Image: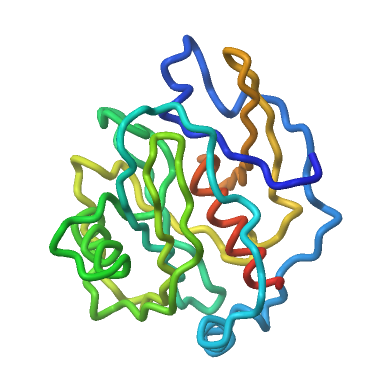
Amino acid sequence: MTSAPAPSSLASLSSLPDFDPRHVPVVGVDRHLPRVAPSQTTPQALRQRFAAPPAWEPEVVQEKSFSSRSPAHAAVLVPIVLREQPTVLLTERTAHLSTHSGQVAFPGGRADPEDASPADTALREAYEEVGLEPHFVEVLGSLPTYVTGSSFIISPVVALVQPHCVLRPNPHEVADIFEVPLAFLLNPAHHQRHVFEWQGVRREWFSMPYQSGPKNHYIWGATAGMLRNFYRFLRA
């Protein structure tokens, strides 16, 4: 695979008996690509990058559609926690949700008519899902929209988060909150490529499995695709 894959969405494949993305073979790992240097992920470097972005193109833009419903706008927060070594805060969705159950995701969701911007949507949803209060958050800017197979047009809003924030996960939506080192996610040696064919449709996606103690957090699909775009943005 030499061009941008269109990552599959869990919602499109979870109806298959015994489907588990962890069991889809890895067809490639991008160890040949350079990682993002730590000097590029300091708070000031990130502020400067969003204030004066370079010319670049996202690698992953749109999944293959599996839905006939009308497109809907949404936003997610890409929260970079300002620890000594920066991390990205992620959630694991509860198993009973109708869509993306059990999936690793950024805090976020569908835009409301009252939201003035994607940043407003992302901040509101982050507060509703994990109790992240906006005064702990510094919004840097947005990455290009990402269109899921379920017709959500997602705006990824990148932000810096103070590490002393107090989180209160919504038990209806969030089963777990965890952090992954930003350096891990921005190192293509951890970007795995997968291919899966179903009903004559070839679906491709990235995964970035992260082992934390006894638990393996399986980051894949849309979340991994947006992180891949963030990598391309910082390397441009």
Q: Viewer-proximal residue, 191 or 122?
A: 122
Q: Residue furthest left?
A: 114
| Residue beneath the point at 25% across and 57% down | 130
In the depicted view, which residue is nearer to us: 171 or 110? 110
Counting the numbered discs, the total is 0
Residue beneath the point at 48% across and 63% down: 88
Q: Where is residue 65 in the image (x, y as percent from the top left)?
A: 48, 32
In the image, taking residue 162 as reference, residue 2 lies left or right, namely right
Q: Which image quadrant: the N terminus? A: top right
On the image, the x and y values in percent for residue 200 come to 63, 15
Please name whichever residue, 151 or 29, is drawn nearer the observer in this view of the structure: 151
**Residue 12 figure quarter:** top left
Is 63 on the left or on the right of 81, as rendered?
right
Residue at the (21%, 58%) spot, across then down? 168
* Residue 147 drawn at (x, y percent): 46, 46
User: With 211 as the anchor, is 171 left or right in this view?
Assistant: left
On screen, residue 71 above or below 189: above
The image quarter containing residue 75 is bottom left
Look at the picture and state if 142 lies above or below 220: below
Question: Which residue lies at the image location 52% right of the left edge and 17% below the top edge?
Answer: 19
What is the residue that sits farthest to the right in this orientation? 32
Q: Position of residue 80 (x, y in %)?
A: 46, 70
| 205 horizontally vs 150: left or right | right
- What kind of colouring is applied to the model shown? rainbow
Q: Quadrant of the C terminus?
A: bottom right
